[in-house]
Image: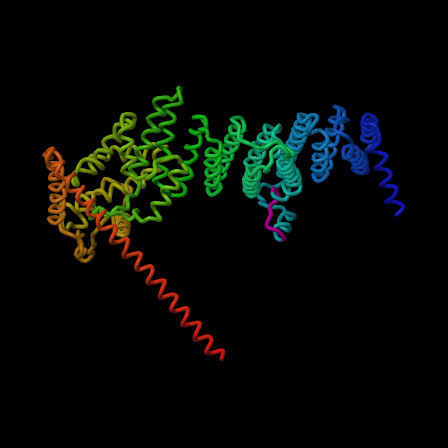
Amino acid sequence: QYFDFFKIMNRAVNSALKPEYVLKRVADIINSAVGNNADKEKAIALELLHNVIGAKRKAATFNKIFESLMKKHIELCVDLKDHHTAKDGLHQYRNLCQMADPNSLEIVILHLLELSEARASAAKEKADKVALAAAARVSDLDQEESPESIMLSSMTEEGAKDRTDREVVVPWLKFLWENYRAILELIFKIPKLDRVYHKTCEKAFKFCLEYKRVLEFRRLCEMLRMQLVTLQKVAPINPLRATRPQWEWTPELLEYHLTTRFSQLEVATQLELWNEGYRTVEDIYSIIVAGKKTPKPKLMVSYYEKLTKIFWVSENKLFHAYSWFRYYVLCCESRKDYKSEEKMLSASCVLLSALTIPTFKDIYSDLSLDDDETVVDRKSQMAVLFDFQSNPSRQSLLSDIVTKGVLSDVYPELVSLYECLEVKFQPLNLIKNILAAVELVSSTTSLSPYAGPLQRIIVLKVMQQLAKVYNTVKLDFVYKLLAPLRNLSPNQIERILIEGVTSKQLQLRINHSLGCIYFNVASNSPSAADMQVAQFGSAVSAISTQIETLTTTAEKVAEAREKRLQYFATILEASDEEYSQCVERKMLIERNKENLEKNLLVKANKERE
């Protein structure tokens, strides 16, 4: 009890001392801190500074000497790797200088981050040097491992480099991560420190990327998301009595948040965290909607570039193609240094991504599997989220590509590819005419990811066109026709055909015993003649409607108007009778209800008696 009393009195005395004296006293303690007791002496100096900073005083007593005290406090916390005291000290210093000089808190925070990052980098370099020194101590290079490392590996799965990192680097990484988290939690509600808040976010993203901290990156994203939700909560009912100014979106704040989220999206793509990248895209959309302002074109170009990677990995070919299209359009509109080679490559990616969209349309009807309401709603929601068309589809995207003149910027071989796949009908010469385009795609590094999907689309297109000409073809004939596609074996071709049948893109049956392919095998599928008759009937009906519209005269218009007026008059005459019938029915229902209630009441009275 006596020791506790002495400790409390010591804190009271320390808090009452002048800051100049405390700073001098701390310097003396640090200078005398040598040998084995150095950490203990530094801990005493840190406690002395912490007591002075945390002492209760009026805001008017703040001056610049406290900033020097806080910097010394931060340096001692870094030396001792004491993130708890550093966090508490930042809270105390915020209360001290928030009203008088908030820029001082920014200086202190940046000082803490600079010291922590320098120590973490030094620890990483030291770990690398230790690993190199250990390698230099190996006397026999033919000996893969030393006896000591073999014994350690039998007890744990860690290697020598992993053990060195855990002992040297990890404590500093943890200290740096705790500082990032404490600073973000400390200042996210202070409007005057928005700049340092977002600068800290950038540093934290860089930390996660440099040290491959996947779990910490997910926690960081979730923390930023929750902090933004907290800021957007409903303001007090009476703003005049609010203890702090009402938070609102400003152009500068919107720019800060969007820049931070775009950096977050870039780090998510580099770490290959595609789910987190998708959630970041949702955050960006919510910020744009809340701020009611379109971001700068430069940011949107980077945004759609990241979306192309996210949708490619998630195998959403439709939105991948739309992302490429939006990226190309924005680059053409905003980039003055858009080189012709780069523009041609981007335009080619736009066209190939659109052509390789798998169409799930049944070729024997005008219905589509994608017409399901849930699928359409989901696609529409995603289209709004990414600022695409309200009802995106492969055909509408290809129409936009032609309208915007994208075909004039692509490689000439790809123009021929588009015409052969989407315009011309040439089942026997299709492969020969597009072979140059296929070789170009396979040999170009940036276009090679589309080589596989493109060959699949080509095979399906050839089979669809053959089905309109033949009822039966030989398997050898199909293999020979597709032989110029050298990367496809017969087994791969059959796999593509089976997948096409499953997705209702093809309607065929393979007979291996006879070596044949039969088209139009479904019993309920209409014949080619029936389809032609139906198409002819639709065309005749459309022509008849147009002719009737053109031959309409003034007399016919007047006659139709007279008939319509007579129809409305008949409705008015019948409305009175309908109304009286409804009233009678209502009265009858009321009487029946009253009679039923009376009968129930009489029955209840008899049961009581």
Tally of marks: 0
Viewer-side residue, 151 vs 271: 271
Question: Which of 546 and 203 lies nearest the eye of the viewer?
Answer: 546
Residue at the (40%, 23%) spot, across then down? 334
Whole-percent x, y for residue 306 in the image: 43, 34
In front of the other: 264 or 131? 264
Splitting the image into 4 quarters, where does residue 378 fall? top left
Which residue is at the front of the view, 366 or 576? 576
Q: Any magenta on residue 159?
A: yes
Is residue 211 something that shows in the picture? no
Placement of 577 over or under 306, stated as above or below? below
Residue 42, image x, y percentages: 79, 35
Whether residue 157 can be seen here: yes
Relative image position of residue 214 (x, y in whole percent): 54, 42
Q: How is the image coloured?
A: rainbow
Q: Is residue 321 above or below residue 521?
A: above
Q: Residue furthest top?
A: 336
In-image side of 141 versus 357 (left or right) = right
Q: Residue at x 29, y 27 (%)?
A: 404
Q: In the rendered image of this protein, does residue 397 appear above or below residue 156?
A: above
Q: For residue 545: magenta?
A: no
In percent of width and height, residue 377 lies at: 36, 45
Residue at the far right in the pictured view: 2
Residue name at image x 25 percent, y 27 percent: 412
- Which residue range is magenta in the image? 155-161
Above or below, 524 relative to 199: below
Q: Quadrant of residue 435?
A: top left
